[in-house]
Amino acid sequence: MKKVGIQGYYNSFHEIVAHQYFKNEEIEIVPCMTFEGLFDAIHSLKADIGIVAIENTLVGSILGNYTLLRESNLFIRAEHKLRVKHSLLALEGQKIEDITEVHSHPMALQQCSEFFKRYPHIKLINSDDTAYSAYEISQKQIPGRGAISNEIAAKSFGLKLLARGIETNKRNFTRFLIVSPIDESERQIKINGEINKASWVVTLSHRSGSLAQLLTVLAAFDISLTKIQSLPLVGQEWTYLFYIDMVFDKNEQYQRAVQSIGKYVEDLRILGEYPAAITPVEHQQISTLH
C-alpha cells in the first residue's frame, strides 16, 4: 500500500487531493502538521510520496515550499489543481452569533477575509490546519468556536455547517505538487510524450541582461512560461534564485533548451518534468474519507 504524506490532518484538502489523484488505488494517509514535517516523513521513509500545496489563485505562492523543495532530493512527478470551497463549521446547536473565535490555517483565513468583515465580533486565530481545527472542536466539544474547513470534514467530525462557500472569490483554486524521490536515470526514462511541463530553479550569472537572455532562449525553442518567481539566495547578498514553470509541445525542443542555457545560468536544477494538470477538480466529488 502506497504511503502518502499530507500536510494537515485527516479530511484536509491535502487528503482530498491524495484520493482524487490516486483514484481507485488503496493508499495509507500519513498526516503531517507542517510542510517541514511532510518532507521529513518522506526522507525518513515514513511516507513514499507527498502532496504539497504550492500556490493559490487568491493569496499567491507558498514561498517556503519552494525552498523546501529545492533543498530536498525530491522530484515533482505530477500536479493537481483543486477548486477550494471553504465552509464555517461549529458544534451542533450553535449559531453564527454564538461564535466568538474562528480557527484555521492562515491561508484559509486570508481566503475568507471578506466574509468575516460582516462579523466583527469574531476573532480570527491562526492554526496549523483547516481539518485539525474542525477536529479539535469536535473532540473537545468547544462551544463558541468555529473552524474554516470543508464539508467532508463537517460530515466526518459531526459538525454543523454554519455557512458554505465563504471564500472571498469563487475562482479559488489551489495547485498541488505530487513529489517523491527520483534518481537521474529514472528522470531520463520518464521523459516521454506525456510530459509537457517542467519546473526549474536557476541561479543567473552576474551579467547584465542574463534573465532576458535566458527567456529569449526558451522562447526560441517554443517554450511558454506559466510562472516565474524570484527569491533571494540566503547568504549571498543581491543574488536571486528564479523558480520557473514552463509548458512545451515537443519534447525534443525542450531537451535542446536544457542543453542550450548553460552559458546563461550559474546553476540549473530541474525540480520536475511531468504532465500539466488541465481541469481543476471540485472537492465535493468525494463525499467522505473516514
Image (cartoon, grey):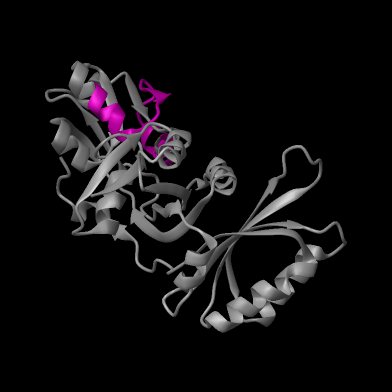
* Image point (23%, 50%), residue name: 1
Q: Which residues are magenta?
A: 109-136
Image vertical order of residue 70 relative to residue 267, above or below: above
* Image point (21%, 16%), residue name: 140
The percent coordinates of residue 43 (x first, y second) are 45, 41
The percent coordinates of residue 181 (x first, y second) are 46, 52
Image vertical order of residue 147 relative to residue 271, above or below: above
* Image point (65%, 79%), residue name: 256
* Image point (60%, 82%), residue name: 253
Q: Is-magenta flag for residue 90?
A: no
Q: Quadrant of residue 79?
A: bottom left
The percent coordinates of residue 272 (x first, y second) are 52, 61
Front in this rendered view, residue 121 or 252: 252
The percent coordinates of residue 203 (x first, y second) are 73, 55
Q: Is-magenta flag for residue 128?
A: yes
Image vertical order of residue 80 relative to residue 237, above or below: below
